[in-house]
Amino acid sequence: MPSLARFGLDDKVVIVTGAGRGIGRVIAREAAESGALIAVGSRTTTELETLTRAIEDAGGACFHHALDVTDLASIAAFTAAVVARYGRIDVLVNNAGYNKLGPIIDTDEALYQRIVDANLKSVLFCSQAAARQMIAQGSGGAIVNISSQASVIGAPERGIYSGAKAGVNNMSRTMAAEWAEHGIRVNVVAPTVTRSPLAEQALADSASFAAAVRRNNLLRHDLAEPEEISAPVIFLASDAASMITGQVLVVDGGWTMV
């Protein structure tokens, strides 16, 4: 296969969780533009219906189905629906997540459980379901888990989130080791603060946060764009990354090295 062709996702069935908005929506759209057959899921499907229409209007293929990434029965039903629609799973992008800012000393058990379930439990059981299908197919596959720069540095008011995302990093390495014999690659993309309505509002509301972004992001004075996160995800999902597994790619403009 020519080198440039290896960067595409032609006819690969790609699942993206949490694709209704933000980074996940861009990943789904750009994977479709790269030739993939897309499957997206979230608890509410209104935004997914809009995404599906946009991808199909552009000539792509997209299937949406209800999915609660913290519920094992929902994960099983979603996985079965994807296989019934496309016949296989080639790539899983675990993008769904949740956080609520606050000091660790004020974190109660309910908030702890919600953050861990959304960011760590979800990755485990969505990956497990996809990997079982990939193993049954016998043709390998790729899993790309979305972590955070908060997984590799201390992040005030993000203590439980950063702990869960650090768990994603190391659990992904273990998945990579265990599933390599089946030709399944598992990698992580760990983004910096990325443009979204919430991030932009945080910049507007907090001068100290805005200053930290400008000071620590060495390549720019603003937020990362969703497309700057999507591109590394698509690379790791593609055959161009066929020799890469068990890695955490931090996409942060140099933030974590200062």
Image: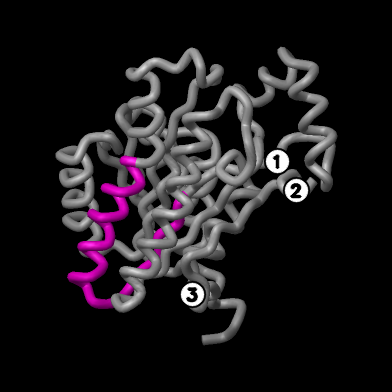
Q: Secondary structure at mark 3?
A: helix
Say which quarter of the image contains residue 177: bottom left
Q: CA distance from mark 3 to mark 2?
A: 25 Å
Nearer the N terminus, badge 3 or badge 2? Answer: 3
Q: Which residue is mark 3?
A: 239
Q: Which residues are magenta?
A: 121-145
Question: Could you tell me which residue is drawn at 55 percent across and 58 percent down?
Answer: 248
Q: Residue at x 31, y 47 (%)?
A: 63
Q: Mark 1 — residue? A: 224
Compare residues 65 and 249 and report the one nearer the observer.
Answer: 249
Residue 226: tell me if it is visible: no
Q: In this view of the protein, can residue 216 be seen by the observer? A: yes
The verdict on residue 128 being magenta is yes
Left or right of residue 104, residue 75 in this image? left
Mark 2: which amino acid?
A: Gly
Q: Which residue is mark 2?
A: 253
Q: So how many labels did they put on this image?
A: 3
Where residue 157 appears, as percent x and y from the top left, is 58, 23
Q: Are marks 2 and 1 in contact (CB under 8 Å)?
A: yes
